[in-house]
Image (spheres, rainbow, N blue to C red):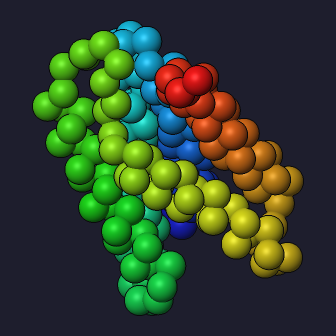
């Protein structure tokens, strides 16, 4: 597999994992206890693991290691969050109204996905229409999740 093919494969799985994350992030907020939530989180984890593995192939084909900067540090913490999600998803049984990830991890991963596309849009050389689409998906997922949690949260009268 050539360098360009690896780069495209990496981008495709990043986008697939973003869409699966957004779906799981919103569906979990329905809090209806259906097994689809666990399936969506597991699908996201699988797609993101493939993406991370392809990133390693990408840097191997590039012949360079990634520079240690604040963005890489955030991503390392994100990988730790994914590890925690894998543990919880495998451990947790489908219990009614159970969250599969803690709100802090969910919103942190939401922030990483959102910030990635904001940073791409700020860099005119890397910005593309797909970044606008994916940023919109993430912003809508965050807004819908907030609305759904507000709907399901009892309010004192």
- Residue positioned 43% across, 73% down in the render: 74
Q: Residue furthest bottom?
A: 68
Residue 126 x, y percent position in the rendering: 77, 72
Quarter placement of the C terminus = top right
Q: Residue furthest front?
A: 157
How many numbered circles are shown?
0
Nearer the observer, 8 or 132: 132
Residue 58 x, y percent position in the rendering: 46, 67
Q: Residue furthest left?
A: 91
Residue 23 x, y percent position in the rendering: 56, 30
Q: Tell me if 12 is positioned left or right of 119 in this view.
A: left
Q: Is residue 65 above or below residue 124?
A: below
- Residue positioned 34% across, 30% down in the render: 99
- Residue positioned 64% across, 57% down in the render: 114
* Residue 73 appears in the rendering: yes
Nearer the observer, 2 or 77: 77
Residue 132 x, y percent position in the rendering: 81, 53
Q: Is residue 130 above or below residue 19?
A: below
- Residue positioned 18% across, 42% down in the render: 87
Q: Tell me if 114 is positioned left or right of 57 in this view.
A: right
Q: Is residue 136 above or below residue 98?
A: below
Residue 36's quadrant in the figure?
A: top left
Q: Tell me if 45 is positioned left or right of 17 in this view.
A: left
Nearer the observer, 97 or 18: 97
* Residue 9 appears in the rendering: no
Q: Tell me if 124 is positioned left or right of 98 in this view.
A: right
Residue 45's quadrant in the figure?
A: top left
């Amino acid at each position: 597999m050539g360098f360009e093919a690896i780069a495209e494969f990496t981008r495709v799985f990043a986008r697939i994992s973003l869409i699966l994350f957004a779906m799981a992030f919103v569906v979990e907020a329905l809090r209806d206890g259906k097994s689809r939530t666990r399936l969506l989180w597991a699908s996201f984890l699988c797609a993101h693991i493939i993406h991370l593995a392809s990133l390693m192939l990408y840097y191997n084909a590039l012949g360079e290691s990634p520079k240690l900067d604040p963005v890489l540090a955030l991503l390392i913490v994100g990988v730790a969050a994914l590890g925690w999600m894998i543990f919880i998803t495998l451990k947790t049984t489908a219990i009614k109204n159970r969250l599969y990830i803690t709100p802090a991890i969910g919103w942190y991963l939401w922030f990483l996905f959102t910030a990635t596309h904001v940073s791409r849009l700020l860099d005119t050389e890397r910005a593309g229409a797909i970044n606008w689409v994916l940023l919109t998906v993430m912003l809508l997922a965050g807004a819908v999740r907030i609305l759904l949690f507000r709907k399901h949260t009892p309010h004192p009268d």
